[in-house]
Amino acid sequence: MKKARLLLACLLSLSCTAQNMTTVFGNMPKNLILLVDSTQRQDLMDLVKEGVSNSTKDKLNGKVTLARFGENFMELKSGNSSLQIALLSLVNDSKIVCMIQTVCAPVCDSRLSFYTSDWKVLDTSSFIQLAETSWFIKDDVDKNNEDFINAAKSLDMDLMQYNFNPENLTLTQTYTTPLYLSKEAKEEIEPFLKKESKVFEWKKLGFK
């Protein structure tokens, strides 16, 4: 019931809002994207549309690249970080923003968040139930096994990488903590971990 009320409020708030990537990216609050201001963002979009370039300097004189830019998806890259923004259609064709911020230093870790198309924050749990660390452990593992207990001690943080595929509207969640471990610790825990990532598909009301 709470989710239904939230979605209704979201739909109403979106009813009169421009819903295209140019407007959404151009109006993105500066606290969410520190390296490029609104003028630089517009310059990037103009360069891409004109087929001239897809890169410019950021505020720190580094290189920022608009790697992909389309009607409903864009990806911005700068150094060891990336930003993905997807416009996702709801049941009445209104759209919400799905944003993925990823930093690889050196192991990739992401933050996933949702907004209305005019950048009002939405509750992430209303649109996706992300997998917990336990999902990435093989189903047949005896968690009381001494070898597993000892190996799992190295998993002292939860690092997850998210990636959106605009072609099939899927979101992939990858457990990256093992990549952070020493070679010995990684070899000890790998036999207990699934090799696959968790994949979600957008279904108009949320990722399933």
Image (spheres, rainbow, N blue to C red):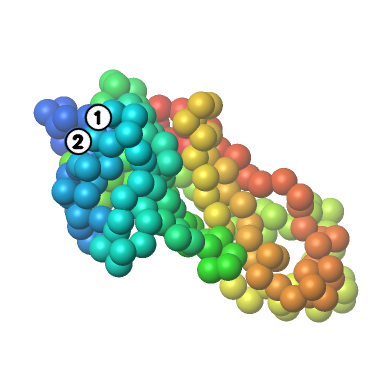
In the rendered image, the residue lying farthest to the front is 52
Dots 2, 1 in contact, CB < 8 A: yes
Q: Measured from the top left, where is residue 80 in percent x and y?
A: 48, 61
- 142 is higher (above) or lower (below) than 50: below
User: How many numbered dots are placed on residues in this image?
Assistant: 2
Q: Is residue 72 in view? A: no
Query: Disc number at residue 23?
Result: 2
Which element type, helix, strand or loop, lies under badge 1?
Answer: loop
**Above or below, 194 relative to 17:** below
Compared with residue 189, is residue 95 higher up or lower down, i.e. above or below? Answer: above
Residue 20 image label:
1
In this rendering, is residue 149 above or below 86? below
Q: Can residue 73 be seen in this view?
A: yes
Give x and y (percent) for residue 24: 23, 39
**What residue is at 45 percent from the left and 60 percent from the top?**
79
In this view of the protein, which residue sits in the foreground, 179 or 139?
Answer: 179
Q: Quadrant of residue 36?
A: bottom left
Q: What element carries label 2?
A: helix
Q: Could you say which is closer to the camera, residue 104 or residue 133?
A: 104
Residue closest to the eye, 9 or 68: 68
Residue at 32%, 34% (x, y): give it. 52
Q: What residue type is labelled 2?
A: Thr
The answer to whether residue 198 is left or right of residue 112 is right
Q: How much space separates mark 2 and mark 1, taking CA atoms?
A: 6 Å
Please give the name of the residue rendered at 63% of the width and 45% of the height, measured from the top-left corner. 198
Name the side, left or right, on which 103 lies relative to 136: left
